[in-house]
């Protein structure tokens, strides 16, 4: 059969030979052109590009900072601001996938405060040493610096920070409460009088719930992990924290939507007038001013309530640290540009335009800053006595274990919930368990 | 499929049952056939067999990307950890529930749509195109649109529910909405496969049944459905395999929160959020085994046949 086919095909092939040759040439030309084009990209002779990956900022402050630092480089490099997805989880996954693939187009990374230990342990970010480290730590607040430190080395420079305050209505509450128990009593009294009485706090099954639990545990004098981050600590302070959460969720002070509330839902509830207290970030202040001028007249702030009367609270901070990627082609330029992006001028602009609290202590006493942040002194006091979330490369697992066990807050059984969290954290630290 | 018939035909005409008695010509042709298939086979092996093999290899190690220096070979202990974890079994039952309910609903609705498409006289092309529109929309886009519709305060469907109801944050309502999104998206595909089967039912048989006094329902259940059995089984096979691996709708609608996560979501979370390559690969291999079992069950037990390989009137 095959010889017949070959015999039949031969004359056809012979007559098709000139046409076939042209056809082959036509097909191979675009392929060669593609190869040449791809070879060309890395041999440009202009200034080096330093890619800065950060959360998307709509205020223009970050784009302005990138332009400032490009000018400050004197033509040696230009800083390009690349936007990551809006949610923290989306940002982390983008960065993690590219770093795991050793992408060399990442230079400066805007990391959430909980990611530095994870990225450092995986050797994805470079440590800051020598003169760079001195410049990064000069005048910077202590607690944000602590979030960027892992095993004694500094892995990122704090960019902006954030912390929660107690917001309350002075027409309902003459004097702010100092502890959670006091706040619950005040709310119950208001409920009996038929006045707005909800305490707004983030109770949905997400990172915010972990932040609430961490704040309570630290304020009670304990911590979630031990000092070396090798085992869970928890203990009686954790049981006390879980009890406070359960008590709030089962009291008349709890907003019915508590199990689904994140920061924005708390803000909306406070603005709608049904709440008397709110534990939230400072972004609620300009929002209340713009949306509810009537309620704004009685809108006040105070320190985060503590667990015990004799110990001030230690609110957990958020924020962004800037790190240099390990596979960057221009690490020297990246260190220099990162220091420029978070210098006094750019942090002040980010604070005024973008509402991001700065990490340089000196800015908190500057007049333009205090004018747009009347609560600057309170925020600084909170930051000086703040706590961080557990520092471990397995933070994602720890956080998910906590938020899944404590959700919904009304179903918490303090002792058994803390025991479950302890077991799951032990598994997580050894990469043994699954995450839900 | 078609190569089957071309290589069996010469064997029947040139040689009896003994393969050693192939003529030189037949052997040459067979070798040419293999050589021509070789590039496609190599590409298939590279694209499918290599990732599967690598996943199996990873699943036998304790390999966490966040602790790269502690990677070590641990044999089957990752599988033990997964199969003894309540999170796996919850995801497994949720996946099974979604699969069974959505495929059953899609089969019923798909049959109805297929009958409509088959009987339409006017604007047949328009009806068929209109029915296919949901299948043509990208799954993620459709899921975002459903998520927006069911979000309280802003969603037009959530506005029909009592105020403050957030169906996507409770397990059973959320599962119902996920099934709704899946059914809306893929019923047209089922309908299309069933329409192909419906078109093969000969008119004479139906008319003979009508002459014998069968009612419309009896004609449908006693004549049409049995003759459509191969097409129905193929449609069920495809849809069940796909439904078991559901991911996009759940990821967008609830991100797997509140007990609505499927096994694919569990694998994704453990691979990308926890960066635990060992456990995540073990989950992936287990999903692969489940899907293979489903395919095996359909082909060997129910007798589903791959399209185009019908052997003489089966």
Image: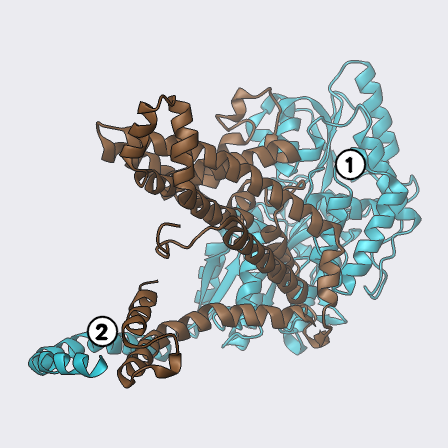
Residue A428: percent from left, percent from top: 76, 60
Chain with cyan colouring: A
* Callout 1 secondary element: helix
Residue B51: percent from left, percent from top: 52, 69
| Front label number (1 vs 2) | 2
Chain with brown colouring: B
Subunit bearing disc 1: A
Outermost front residue: B16
Which is more toward the observer, B34 or B206? B206
Q: CA distance from mark 1 to mark 2?
A: 62 Å
Which residue is rendered at x = 39% and y = 78% of the image? Answer: B18
Which is more toward the observer, A302 or B99? B99
Q: Is residue B226 left or right of residue A416?
A: left
Disc number for residue A409? 1
Which residue is rendered at x = 38% and y = 34% of the image? Answer: B224
| Occupied quadrant, residue B136 | top left
Disc number for residue A391? none
Q: Is residue B84 visible?
A: yes
Residue A157: percent from left, percent from top: 64, 64
Characterize the local packing of mark 2: few (<14), some (14-19) or many (20 or more) Cα atoms within 10 angstroms: few
Which is more toward the observer, A6 or A255? A6
Which residue is rendered at x = 26% and y = 75% of the image? Answer: A31
Disc number for residue A30? 2
* Residue under disc 1 on the same chain as residue under disc 2: yes
Residue B20: percent from left, percent from top: 38, 83
């Amino acid at each position: 059969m095959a010889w017949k086919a070959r015999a039949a095909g031969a004359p056809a092939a012979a007559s098709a030979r000139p046409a076939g040759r042209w056809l082959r040439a036509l097909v191979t030309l675009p392929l060669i052109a593609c190869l040449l084009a791809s070879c060309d990209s890395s041999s440009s002779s202009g200034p080096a590009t330093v890619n800065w990956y950060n959360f998307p900022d709509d205020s223009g402050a970050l784009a302005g900072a990138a332009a400032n630092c490009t000018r400050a480089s004197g033509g040696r490099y230009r800083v390009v601001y690349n936007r990551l997805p809006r949610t923290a989880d989306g940002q982390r996954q983008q960065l993690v996938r590219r770093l795991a693939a050793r992408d060399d187009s990442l230079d400066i990374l805007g990391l959430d405060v909980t990611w530095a230990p994870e990225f450092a342990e995986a050797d994805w970010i470079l440590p800051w040493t020598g003169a760079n480290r001195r410049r990064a730590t000069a005048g910077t607040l202590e607690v944000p610096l602590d979030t960027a430190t892992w095993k004694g080395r500094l892995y990122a420079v704090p960019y902006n920070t954030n912390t929660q305050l107690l917001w309350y209505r002075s027409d309902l509450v003459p004097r702010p409460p100092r502890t959670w128990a006091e706040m619950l009593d005040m709310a119950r009294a208001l409920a009996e009088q038929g006045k707005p009485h909800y305490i707004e706090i983030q109770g949905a099954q997400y990172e915010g719930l972990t932040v609430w639990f961490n704040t309570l545990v630290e304020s009670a004098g304990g911590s979630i992990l031990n000092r070396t981050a090798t085992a869970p600590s928890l203990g009686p302070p954790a049981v006390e924290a879980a009890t406070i959460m359960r008590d709030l969720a089962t009291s008349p002070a709890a907003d019915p939507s508590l199990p689904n509330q994140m920061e924005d839902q708390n803000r909306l509830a406070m603005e709608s007038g049904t709440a008397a207290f709110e534990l939230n970030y400072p972004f609620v202040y300009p929002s209340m001013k713009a949306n509810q001028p009537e309620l704004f007249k009685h809108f006040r702030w105070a320190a985060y309530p503590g667990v015990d009367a004799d110990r001030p609270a230690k609110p957990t901070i958020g924020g962004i640290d800037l790190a240099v990627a390990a596979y960057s082609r221009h690490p020297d330029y990246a260190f220099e540009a990162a220091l420029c992006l978070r210098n006094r001028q750019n942090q002040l602009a980010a604070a005024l335009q973008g509402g991001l609290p700065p990490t340089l202590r000196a800015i908190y006493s500057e007049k333009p800053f205090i004018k747009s942040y009347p609560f600057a002194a309170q925020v600084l006091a909170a930051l000086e006595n703040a706590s961080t979330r557990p520092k471990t490369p397995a933070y994602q697992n720890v956080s998910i274990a906590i938020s899944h066990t404590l959700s919904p807050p009304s179903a918490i059984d303090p002792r058994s919930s803390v025991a479950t969290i302890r077991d799951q954290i032990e598994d997580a630290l050894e990469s043994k368990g699954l995450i839900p | 499929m078609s190569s089957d018939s071309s290589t069996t035909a010469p064997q029947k005409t040139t040689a009896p049952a003994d393969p050693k008695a192939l003529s030189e010509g037949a052997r040459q042709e067979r070798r040419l056939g293999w050589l021509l298939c070789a590039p496609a086979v190599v590409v298939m092996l590279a694209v499918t067999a290599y990732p599967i093999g690598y996943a199996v290899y990873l699943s036998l190690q304790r390999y966490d990307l966040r602790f790269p220096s502690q990677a070590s070979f641990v044999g089957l202990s990752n599988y033990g950890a997964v199969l003894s974890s309540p999170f796996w079994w919850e995801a497994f039952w949720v996946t099974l529930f979604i699969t069974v309910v959505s495929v059953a609903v899609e089969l019923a609705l798909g049959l109805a749509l297929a009958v409509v498409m088959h009987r339409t006289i006017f604007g047949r092309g328009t009806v068929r195109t209109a029915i296919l529109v949901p299948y043509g929309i990208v799954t993620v886009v459709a899921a975002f649109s459903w998520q927006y519709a069911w979000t309280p305060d802003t969603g037009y469907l959530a506005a029909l529910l009592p105020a403050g109801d957030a169906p996507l944050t409770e397990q059973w309502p959320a599962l119902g909405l996920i099934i709704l999104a899946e059914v809306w998206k893929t019923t047209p595909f089922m309908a299309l496969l069933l329409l192909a089967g419906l078109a093969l039912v000969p008119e004479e048989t139906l008319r003979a049944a009508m002459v014998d006094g069968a009612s419309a329902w009896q004609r449908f259940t006693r004549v049409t459905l049995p003759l459509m059995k191969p097409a129905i089984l193929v449609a069920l096979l495809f849809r069940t395999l796909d439904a078991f691996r559901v991911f996009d709708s759940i990821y967008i609608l609830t991100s797997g929160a509140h007990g609505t996560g499927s096994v694919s979501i569990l694998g994704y979370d453990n691979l990308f959020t926890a960066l635990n390559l060992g456990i995540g690969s073990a989950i992936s291999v287990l999903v692969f085994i489940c899907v293979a079992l489903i395919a095996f069950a359909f082909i060997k037990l129910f007798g589903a046949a791959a399209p185009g390989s019908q052997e003489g009137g089966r």
